[in-house]
Amino acid sequence: MVPAEAVSAAPLAPARRSRRELWLRVASGIVLGAAVIAALIQGGWAFAAVWLVAGIAGYGEWIVMSRVEPREVLIALGAATLAAMVLALQQNAPSVACAAILVLGAAACATVARTGAGRARALIGLLCAGVIAAVPTALRDDATLALIGPIWMFAVVWATDITAYFVGRRLGGPKLMRRVSPNKTWSGALGGLLGAVAAGTLVAVGADLMGMALPRGASLPVVAGVSALASILSQAGDLYESWLKRRHGVKDSSRIIPGHGGVMDRLDGFFAVAVLAGLYLALRGYGLIG
């Protein structure tokens, strides 16, 4: 017979574990956020190094998670490619040259991979890692955006994650995509959207009050709309990464970040917003937008 006290204590264990994981998640998030903000303020190589490491770590996680071989060679080749690209960016090389380094490196990884599926995964994975390694740094180094670009990205993505988490836990309701991510709800998704709009708009208002330049045409309605789009993309990126993990039979991309899992787990939504920001930089570079 099981003692009564053991029966009564059993339901408490998951609750304690959940609280412990939440605090661990908060603590590691604060440490990582403080490090990224410090690097952002410093700029230059300090900020570039943060995103180079993130890109390399994310690519390594993807190669391991998707079981592409030979993994050690691919990770080393990917790391060398990303480092060369970031070095070129920091030396103010033309964007076409930096893109060429990434594309050639991705093609080399695809050549090294042993299977057809592995070649596609190696190539696409490195291109995605290149977005993470390049776009935040390119925003920080941009003469117009400077601090504002990365701060807006952080504000929108972090507000989406935090607001969606707490609103979803508080309100519950219908599931967003039960088969992909059972804990996500429509209430959380809407809360994350509203939080991102508020955070992105506040960044623009704060920048204006401090006399910092904003991109041409960046009125508050435009900023709110772009922030809403970025939140939707961030949540879509989160769901897509959840689907990838289910497909490859893993809970987390790695366990490198306490309470968060891996770099891919932490930057899934950020990657989607980085694609949006990179598209803006490319279009502006070609003179298609102001």
Image (cartoon, rainbow, N blue to C red):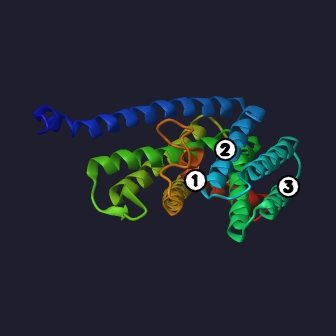
Q: Residue furthest front?
A: 1
The residue under the point 76% across, 62% down is 113
Residue 76 position in % (x across, y down): 78, 47
Q: Is residue 111 visible?
A: yes
Residue 101: mark in rendering: 3
Which amino acid, by three-letter code, is at mark 1? Ser
Q: Is residue 136 visible?
A: no
Q: Earlier in the sequence, mark 3 or mark 1?
A: 3
Which image quarter: residue 179? bottom left
Q: Earlier in the sequence, mark 2 or mark 3?
A: 2
Work out how far the residue at label 2 is from the one at label 3, CA to CA, in angstroms: 19 Å
The residue under the point 78% across, 63% down is 110
Mark 3 residue crowding within 10 angstroms, few (<14) / some (14–19) / many (20+): many
Residue 219: mark in rendering: 1
Which amino acid, by three-letter code, is at mark 2? Ala
Mark 2 residue crowding within 10 angstroms, few (<14) / some (14–19) / many (20+): some
Q: Nearer the viewer, residue 134 or 243?
A: 243
